[in-house]
Amino acid sequence: MKLSASILAAAALLVTARPVERRELGGVLICNGANATGYCEHAQYELDKCFDLKAPLYQNSSTFAPDGEGFYCYPYA
């Protein structure tokens, strides 16, 4: 019984010892079809800077979905 408890405790330490990956802010999914369909690109964009879309998304985007972190993103044409 003590051996199995020790093994469970060691396994729990291994599971919790892994570092948590930190994601970068500014991730946005952009697609040319509605509801994330068609051609899509997901990229991390620098905050507080404007970016021009390139083909095939330039003037042809129907989905604009920020990752949902603590930042705001306002697309404009």
Image (spheres, rainbow, N blue to C red):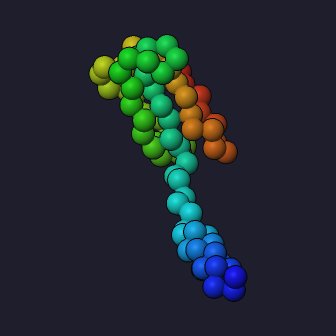
Point out residue 36 in the picture as x, y percentages from the top left corner.
Answer: 48, 21
Residue, x 46% and y 42% (percent of image)?
A: 45
Q: What residue is shown at x 45% (from left), y 26% (from top)?
A: 30
- Give percent across and percent down for residue 28: 50, 35
Q: Is residue 69 above or below residue 9?
A: above
Point out the residue furthest to the left here.
55
Q: Is residue 8 left or right of residue 59?
A: right
* Residue nearest the viewer, comparing 24 with 54: 24
Residue at 42% of width from left, 35% of height from top? 42
* Front-most of residues 65 and 35: 35
Quarter of the figure with the N terminus: bottom right
Asked if 76 appears above or below 1 in the picture, the reply is: above
Front-most of 76 and 9?
9
Tell me: 28 left or right of 41: right
Pinpoint residue 13: horizontal percent, then vertical percent.
61, 76
* Residue at the farthest bottom position: 2
